[in-house]
Image (cartoon, rainbow, N blue to C red):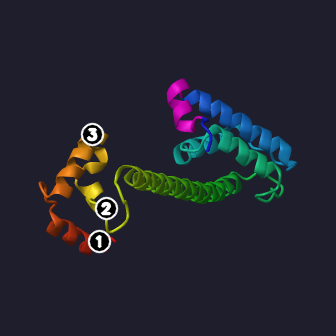
Amino acid sequence: MGKAPSLAVVNEAFGKGTVQSWLALQLHDLSEFSGAREKLTVSKIDDITEVIISQFSYLKVTELMHFFLLFKGGKFGKFYGAVDGLAIMESLRDFADERKKMVLRWRQEEESMAAAARAANDELQYSNLRQRYIERIPDAFSDKAPIDFLQYRLMGFDVMDDERLAREIDAVCSGKKKLPTAAIEMIRGAFRIE
């Protein structure tokens, strides 16, 4: 999940030869490490690097370093008699599949955490709005309140300054201003809002 460049990015930034040389070094090192009698030849290394570049250019340099480390650690088996290019490619495909699952799991966790953060933020905003209603409306959340919480929110009273809000409440209480109760009740019923 780090910010290391992918093979494609390195290829674009420094040219194909850089990626080929780096991969060739990694493959040569793996071949020497393996202890197999028949090592990879230069032409086999070139072939394998071409396949890796064409099929796995989305992998980051660090991911490939991790793959080679895991291979040396025995996660993908071992070579019998000769270092096998197909065995390396099969192992790399298994590694890429495992990586894909890990990335998907990581993204799901990130989305879940982001959704939880949004929900917490929404809850905080709602709580703040309720508190503001309590502080600004006499007899808030009671039958005596001149404006109920839904009216406060829908009619824009929540964004009014205190002076204007006081004038509006006076107008409602004195009967000079009527609130559109039918529309409010329709919304309340449609969304089952208390």
Rendered image: mark on residue 102: none
Q: Nearer the viewer, residue 24 or 128?
A: 128
- SS state under label 3: helix
* Tag 3 residue: 163
Q: Main secondary structure of the magenta part?
A: helix
- Residue 114, compared with residue 53, is above or below; it is below
- Residue 102, compared with residue 57, is above or below; it is below
**Mark 1 or mark 3, which is nearer the start of the sequence?**
3
* Tag 1 residue: 191
Residue at x 15% of width, y 62% of height: 180
User: Residue 90: x, y in percent?
Assistant: 65, 58
**Mark 1 or mark 2, which is nearer the start of the sequence?**
2
Q: Residue furthest top?
A: 14
User: Residue 54: x, y in percent?
Assistant: 52, 44
User: Residue 24: x, y in percent?
Assistant: 69, 36
Residue at x 55% of width, y 55% of height: 113
For the residues bearing labels 2 and 1, Cβ distance under 8 angstroms: no
Q: Amino acid at mark 1?
A: Phe
3D distance between C-alphas at marks 2 and 3: 18 Å
3D distance between C-alphas at marks 2 and 1: 21 Å
* Tag 2 residue: 145
Q: Nearer the viewer, residue 28 or 146?
A: 146
State whether residue 86 appears in this view: yes
In the picture, which quadrant includes the N terminus? Answer: top right
The local crowd at label 2, few if under 14, some if 14 to 19, many if 20 or more residues have their Cα within 10 Å, is some
